[in-house]
Image: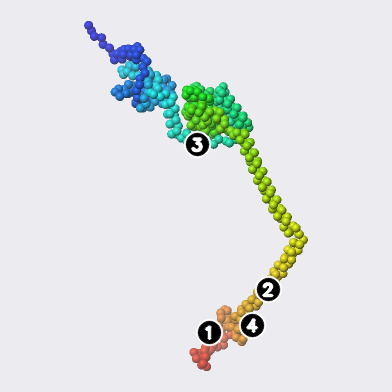
Amino acid sequence: MEQQIYSVTQINTYIQSMMDSDRLLSGLCIRGEISNYKVYPSGHHYFSLKDATGALRCVMFKSSAIRLRFRPENGMKVLALGKISVFPRDGAYQLYCTNLTPDGVGDLHVAFEQLKAKLQAEGLFDPSHKKPLPRYPGTIAIITSSAGAAVHDMLRILRKRYPLTKVLLLPVRVQGVEAPAELCGAIRYVNRWDLADLIITGRGGGSLEDLWAFNDEMLARTIYESRIPVISAVGHEPDVTISDYVADLRAATPSNAAELAVPDREELIRQLRSMASAMGAHLAKQVKVNRQRLNTLAAARPLQSPTAYLDERRLLLDSIQRRLCAAQQQALAKNRQRCVRLTAALDAMSPLKVLTRGYAMAQTKGGQLLRQVEQVRSGDRFTLQLSDGRIRASVESTEQLGPQEGKGGSYERTE
């Protein structure tokens, strides 16, 4: 009997059909640790599941991967749901995974922690970025469901605590796949048109799945980018969402958000009364002090007897005037005497004073003072300065005194 020959593709296809028809291999849940995790441009995810002694190749197509609520990572222990089949092209069997869940914890919890760590690393939770809330907001935008009890609680509290503020209600979905986009759109709308001084976004309590819209990354970034301060009020006290971390202020409940958003009217009235009382007391004190000062001034002598006071002031002024005049005359006489002394001293030192005693001062034609016979020659013209005028003359001859002239000796030089 001739043996039948099969092609590789036929064998791979046969094995694939056998595995696909095996009910055990069609609905498996496998526990393992993720390794070699890769996401291709096509959107398909490829990885391996391994335990202490073995490994299993896995693929998750894009249609299944987009439904994951967390980001799978190498080293993560998971439960993988899917079927075992053969890829005919290379004959390798693998798990065609339709869902992944973290082993031991829920996928939403893992997704929450992953997004929290990511945004925290980017600085979206940094306290320095938190914007201060306005003390007296003129308009508050409430972004929440119009059907829930939360919005009615907030409106009631706002009207009671601070009726001066206006409320702008923007109804949106707060649950489901469309909720994050609607929440983001409402926040951007209020910012774009500058419609409010403060934004409150949130909802009442619920399960983790019900509150999941407020753990959306796009919503977190929209709150972070808001120019208008945002209060996040999601669920009850134990409920904490990503929106709570990134908002400028987290309120435990929607009612608490309304209390934090506006001042209490009764407290403001008490403060105003206290301020009015303090101002009144201060004013009364000032009036008392000024009255005492006025009484003191009124009791002073100038006001009690102004005529006598003016007479005394006039006498004092006359006395001061006389003393000033006397001091002025004394100073003038003293300066005049000093001027006479200085004039006499200057006159005694004047060269002209010497001329009155019979001396003369000779100067050359150029105005040079003659001190020695050698400065002139016979025929040179010169000027004699006397006490009362000048004489213009010329040199007929010169005579130079000898060394002993002072003792009667002399000689003559004629040119």
Closer to us: mark 1 or mark 2?
Answer: 2
Which mark sits nearer the N-terminus, 3 or 4? 3
Which mark sits nearer the N-terminus, 3 or 2? 3
Q: For label 2, count other residues whose C-alpha is less than 10 Å away and answer few (under 14), some (14-19) or many (20+).
A: few
Badge 2 is on which residue? 330
Numbered badge on residue 389: 4
Closer to us: mark 3 or mark 4?
Answer: 3
- Residue pushed farthest left? 1
Residue at horizontal 36 percent and vertical 14 percent from the top: 26
Q: Secondary structure at mark 3?
A: helix
Badge 1 is on which residue? 372
Residues at badges 4 and 2 in contact (C-beta under 8 Å)? no
* Cα distance between the residues tagged 1 and 2: 52 Å
Q: For label 1, count other residues whose C-alpha is less than 10 Å away and answer few (under 14), some (14-19) or many (20+).
A: few
* Cα distance between the residues tagged 1 and 4: 22 Å
The structure's colour scheme is rainbow
Q: Secondary structure at mark 2?
A: helix
**Residue 113 drawn at (x, y percent):** 43, 29
Circle 1: residue type: Gln
Does residue 312 appear to the left or right of 170 in the view shown? Answer: right
Examine the rendered structure and indicate whether residue 247 appears above or below residue 11: below
Q: Secondary structure at mark 1?
A: loop
Circle 3: residue type: His
* Cα distance between the residues tagged 3 and 2: 82 Å
> Who is closer to the viewer here, 415 or 352?
352
Does residue 97 appear to the left or right of 326 in the view shown? Answer: left
- Residue pushed farthest right? 307
Closer to us: mark 1 or mark 3?
Answer: 3
Badge 3 is on which residue? 129
Which mark sits nearer the N-terminus, 1 or 3? 3
